[in-house]
C-alpha cells in the first residue's frame, strides 16, 4: 500500500482551475486518509520548493498534479532525493499521466483509484539529454520556440500575450527556418542539418506521434524536418505543436536510434516534455529502458498480483 504520501498541486493547472483547488484537495484527503502527510498547493514555479517541503516532512511518495514538463522535473528530483513520484493530469496534453492512469483518467477518477488501492509501480522507459530526463520527447530547432509562443498565447486574454507570441513567431526565421542551426549525428557517423528535430521515447510515442508497436523499443523514434520550403515547414511545425500531427514523409526524415548527438548554437534551446531549457552543446541523448519507477494504476489483474508499495 501507499504510505506517507504527499500531494503537490499546481493551482494554475487547467484541470485544477476547472475543478477548484479546494475540491481537488478534498478529494485526495478523502482518498488517502491516514496515509496522507500533507497537500501542498502553489504555482508552477513553487512546485519544486513544495516537493522539498514534503520530503522534509517525511513523504516517501509524492503525487504531483501538473503538466508533463512539471511532472518530469519532479521525477528527476525523485531520482536524486530517493522518493517515489508519479504524474497526475494538470496540463494540456498529460501524455505521461495518461500512460500511468489510463486514457480517460481525470483527477477525481485517479483519487478513486488511490482510495481503492489498485496502484503499482510502473518502471518507465526514459530518455536522458545531458543527464536531464524526458519521458515523452525532446525537441530542437523551431519547435521549442513555437512551444514558447503557444505558452505566451495562453495569456491571450491580455493583448500583451498575443503580441509577445506574434513577435516570437516572427523571429523564428532568423532562429532556425532560413538558417537552420541544428546538426544531428547518428551512431553510424552521419551528420545532417535540419530546422526542426523531434526525438520521442518509443514506449509512449504511439500516444502522440505514431500508432502501433515498435520493432525496437530500446531506441528513440526521430523525425527531422528539412529546411527546404520554410513556409510549409512552419505550417507543419505549428500543426505538430497544436494538433500532434507531425508525420509528413515529403518533408520529414524518420529514423530510429538508441542514442543521438545534437549540436547547434550555444546555448542550445531544447524542449524536454514541453518545458524549454538551455543546454550546452553538444547534447547527448541516450535511451534508458525501465529506468524510472512511477506510481500508476494497476491493470494487471486480481489483488494478489498487485505490486505492494
Image (cartoon, rainbow, N blue to C red):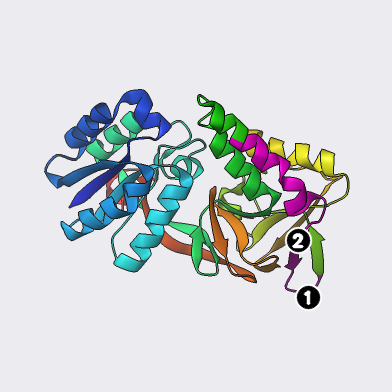
Can residue 308 be seen in this snapshot? no
Question: Is residue 17 rendered magenta in the image?
Answer: no
69 horizontally vs 199: left or right: left
* Secondary structure of the residue carrying numbered label 2: loop
Question: Is residue 189 rendered magenta in the image?
Answer: yes
Quarter of the C terminus within the rendering = bottom left
Give residue 105's quadrant in the image: top left
Coordinates of residue 9 in the picture (x, y in percent): 30, 40
Answer above or below: position of 211 versus 141: above
| Residues shaded magenta | 164-190
What crowding class fits label 1: few (fewer than 14 Cα within 10 Å), some (14-19), or many (20 or more)?
A: few
Can residue 235 be seen in this snapshot? yes
What crowding class fits label 2: few (fewer than 14 Cα within 10 Å), some (14-19), or many (20 or more)?
A: many
Please identify the residue farthest to the bottom as the structure is shown: 189
Answer above or below: position of 18 versus 120: above
Coordinates of residue 287 in the picture (x, y in percent): 57, 65
Please identify the residue farthest to the left as the structure is shown: 34
Exactly how many numbered labels are in the figure?
2
Front position in the image: 279 or 70: 279
- Image point (26%, 57%), residue name: 52
Residue bearing mark 2:
181
* Secondary structure of the residue carrying numbered label 1: loop
Answer above or below: position of 279 versus 44: below
Answer above or below: position of 263 versus 16: below
Tell me the number on the disc at residue 76.
none
- Image point (32%, 43%), residue name: 302
Residue bearing mark 1:
189
140 horizontally vs 67: left or right: right
Q: CA distance from mark 2 to mark 1?
A: 18 Å
Coordinates of residue 277 in the picture (x, y in percent): 53, 57
Report the mark closest to the observer, 2 or 1: 2
Amino acid at each position: 500500500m501507499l504510505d506517507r504520501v504527499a500531494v503537490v498541486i499546481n493551482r494554475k493547472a487547467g484541470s485544477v482551475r476547472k475543478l477548484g483547488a479546494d475540491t481537488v484537495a478534498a478529494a485526495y484527503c478523502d482518498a488517502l486518509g491516514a496515509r496522507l502527510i500533507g497537500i501542498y498547493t502553489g504555482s508552477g514555479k513553487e512546485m519544486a520548493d513544495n516537493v522539498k517541503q514534503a520530503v522534509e516532512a517525511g513523504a516517501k511518495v509524492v503525487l504531483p498534479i501538473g503538466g508533463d514538463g512539471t511532472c518530469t522535473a519532479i521525477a528527476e528530483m525523485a531520482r536524486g532525493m530517493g522518493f517515489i513520484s508519479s504524474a497526475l493530469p494538470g496540463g494540456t496534453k498529460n501524455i505521461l499521466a495518461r500512460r500511468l492512469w489510463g486514457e480517460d483518467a481525470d483527477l477525481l477518477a485517479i483519487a478513486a483509484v488511490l482510495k481503492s488501492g489498485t496502484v503499482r509501480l510502473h518502471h518507465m522507459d526514459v530518455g536522458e539529454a545531458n543527464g536531464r530526463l524526458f519521458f515523452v520527447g525532446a525537441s530542437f530547432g523551431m519547435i521549442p520556440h513555437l512551444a514558447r509562443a503557444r505558452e505566451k498565447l495562453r495569456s491571450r486574454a491580455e493583448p500583451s500575450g498575443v503580441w509577445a507570441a506574434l513577435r516570437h513567431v516572427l523571429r523564428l526565421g532568423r532562429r532556425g527556418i532560413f538558417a537552420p542551426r541544428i546538426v544531428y549525428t547518428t551512431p553510424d557517423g552521419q551528420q545532417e542539418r535540419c530546422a526542426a528535430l523531434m526525438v520521442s521515447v518509443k514506449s509512449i510515442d504511439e500516444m502522440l506521434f505514431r500508432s502501433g508497436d515498435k520493432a525496437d523499443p530500446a531506441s528513440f523514434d526521430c523525425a527531422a524536418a528539412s529546411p527546404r520550403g520554410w513556409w510549409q515547414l512552419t505550417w507543419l511545425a505549428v500543426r505538430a505543436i497544436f494538433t500532434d500531427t507531425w508525420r509528413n514523409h515529403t518533408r520529414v526524415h524518420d529514423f530510429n536510434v538508441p542514442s543521438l548527438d545534437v549540436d547547434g548554437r550555444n546555448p542550445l534551446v531544447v524542449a524536454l516534455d514541453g518545458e524549454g531549457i538551455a543546454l550546452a552543446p553538444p547534447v547527448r541523448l541516450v535511451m534508458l529502458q525501465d529506468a524510472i519507477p512511477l506510481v500508476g494504476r494497476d491493470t494487471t489483474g486480481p489483488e494478489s498480483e498487485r505490486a505492494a508499495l
